[in-house]
Amino acid sequence: MRIKKRLTATDFELLRAHLRNFEKKNVHALRRILVDGIMQKELALELGMSKEAVSAMVGRAWRIYLQHGQRPEGWRTVEVTLPLEYADVIEELANILNARKHR
């Protein structure tokens, strides 16, 4: 029996900090699979990827989640709604801060 890989939105945001090597479109695809429950085969068709490639991407992200699923000490998760032009800036700032944390 396979374990269904699902995360809450908060858990996914904790995982996102560890997905720096993933392309932005793949991080978005992972969220749709792990949080929204979109079927991997459905997303594979939508992205023009093989089912095996999507499965491998999800498996890799899941292993990262199992290894790093905890929020880093002294950090907190904040969910905000922003205009698009500001959301990109805030995501980039979060990526910079995460990269500095891992130096």
Image (tube, helix red, strand yellow):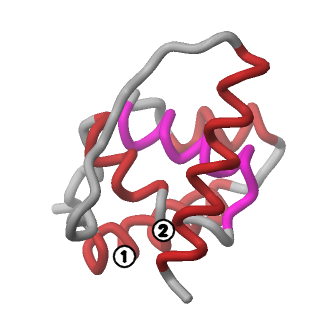
Q: Which residues are magenta?
A: 22-35
Question: As rendered, which of 66 and 42 lies closer to the eye?
Answer: 66
Q: Amino acid at mark 1?
A: Arg
Residue 51: x percent and y percent?
64, 55
- The crowding category of the residue bearing disc 2, from other C-alpha atoms within 10 Å (few below 14, some 14 to 19, many at least 20), is some
What percent of the width, then of the height, locates residue 69?
25, 66
Measured as percent of width and height from the top left, residue 57 is found at 58, 65
Quadrant in which the N terminus is drawn? bottom left
Marker disc for residue 73: none
The kind of residue on which mark 2 rests is: His
| Residue occupied by mark 1 | 63
Residue 32 vertical placement versus 40 (above, below): above
Position of residue 96 in the picture relative to residue 85 (left or right): left
Q: Quadrant of the C terminus?
A: bottom right
Residue that protrudes farthest toward the left in the picture: 1
Q: Residue at x 70, y 48 (%)?
A: 92
Q: Main secondary structure of the magenta part?
A: helix
Check disc 2 and report the residue beneath it: 18
Using the rendered view, name the quadrant where residue 78 is placed. Answer: top left
Gap in Å between the C-alphas at discs 1 and 2? 11 Å
Residue at x 78% of width, y 39% of height: 47
